[in-house]
Image (cartoon, helix red, strand yellow):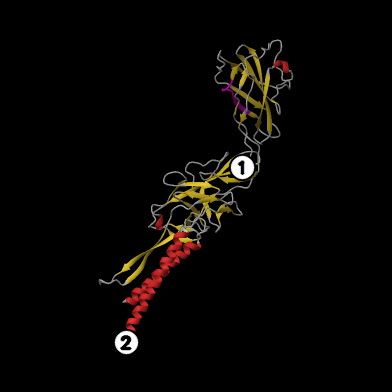
Amino acid sequence: MSFSQGLSGLTAASQALDVVGNNIANSQTVGFKSGSIAFADVFAGSQIGMGVQVSSVNQNFSDGVLGMGNSDLDMGIQGNGFFRLASESGSIFYSRNGQFKQDENGYIVNNQGMFLTGYQATGNPPAIQPGAAVGPIQIPNGQMPARASDAGTLKGNLDSGSKVIDQTANPFDPADNKSYNSVTQLDAYDSLGNKHTINVYYVKTGDNEWKAYSSDTTSPNLNDQGEPVYQELGLSFDTAGQLTTNPAKLSIQGAGYNGGAPLNFDLDMDGMTQQASDTDMGSPTTTGYAPGMMNGYMVGDNGQVIASYSNGQSQLIGQVVLSNFTNPGGLTSKGDNTWAETPESGQPSTGVAGTGNLGNLLGNKLESSNVDLSKEMVNMIVYQRNYQSNSQTIKTQSELLQILANLG
């Protein structure tokens, strides 16, 4: 019986050393989760056991340390969850290795060519649509199309000490700087991305009373006589300098230019004040932009993939999802830093990082292996001693049998 006991001990110690060796070999593997071995005794209807057996090899899914990534598509998970990957055949795998890149078609893939899945942004401007399906994320390589300006904001202060202009004697004329007190310039874009320069003129017509005029200097609307048409808005302030005109919307209109659609949107001036200080309009803003080529992309800390363009704009491309399991230890390892679902793991819960029981996803980070090398070295010594001890029991049993043989 001692031979079988010792042999089982040798086998178990050998397998334990295999686990330790695998942990040490993968100590530098991104996202690797260390394994540990569990033993169970063997009985066969007697008080003396028959030896030992390996009951299971478990994986430790605790977090590894997050370090800096090497590319714009590197990602690291902090807390619960796995990257959800799809093979070309449609099989689903899960991984903690956040080393990703683009393939020849712009899809985000891992080093084995599996597709990283998430929500693809659609529309103009792109956004994650409610109920969007989870699938491979593709980064487009074309240019961002132009967006026409459809709104704007102008906030600032008009100097209450400005000179009152008599418009009867001196009607508004952009060519005559004596017919207005000040002017603000802002940019807008038409449907093709053509840039239009808009001037907003301010005329003080009385105490606490102003008029604002808008003009598209790039492509103005013209009347039947071929003269520019200006849009007008009256602005009234109370004695505290607060705007009483409601709503304060100045129409911005311009004719079609180089094939683009005419401009037609409102400039929100609700934030205007009138105080005894210099006229200052700050930084006017309008929606819309010219077309642009992609400069690069990044992964935000919420898993959003955002591209930047030469027109100064950024655009949402997609959002990476994470999956978690009731029993991650029930996953089966498939190699290449991946696992697959099993009945023991339960079904995955999939969603955006930082929601539910899912951890956080950090861009430009990589999760290192969670192998503790000092602990593995100690385990290796322990299992080596265990192997030696079991071999000694076999040797001793052999010597006892030899003695019995000699007595005969």
User: Is 278 rendered above or below residue 370?
Assistant: above
Q: Which residues are magenta?
A: 264-272
Task: Name the residue at 41% across, 66% down.
Answer: 382
User: Is 116 rendered above or below residue 266?
Assistant: below
The residue singled out by tag 1 in the image is 308
With 175 as the anchor, is 143 left or right in this view?
A: left
Q: Nearer the viewer, residue 205 or 385?
A: 385
Give the tally of numbered discs. 2
With 405 as the anchor, is 291 left or right in this view?
A: right
Q: Residues within 10 Å of mark 2 (few under 14, many from 20)?
A: few
Task: Name the residue at 40% across, 72% down.
Answer: 388
Residue 40 in view in this figure: yes
The residue singled out by tag 2 in the image is 405
Return the x and y of residue 119 as percentages of the image width and height.
51, 46
With 173 as the anchor, is 121 left or right in this view?
A: left
169 drawn magenta: no
Of circles 1 and 2, which is in front? 2
Return the x and y of residue 374 as percentages of the image width and height.
46, 59
Q: Nearer the viewer, residue 263 or 62?
A: 62
Task: Give me the C-alpha separation between circle 1 and circle 2.
Answer: 85 Å
Q: Residues within 10 Å of mark 1 (few under 14, many from 20)?
A: some
Callout 1 secondary element: strand
Task: Name the residue at 30% across, 85% down.
Answer: 404
User: Is 239 rendered above or below residue 254?
Assistant: above
* Quadrant into which the C terminus falls: bottom left
Kindly give the residue lying farthest to the bottom in the view shown: 408
Q: Give amino acid for label 1.
A: Ser
Q: Sequence order check: which comes first, mark 1 or mark 2?
A: 1
270 drawn magenta: yes
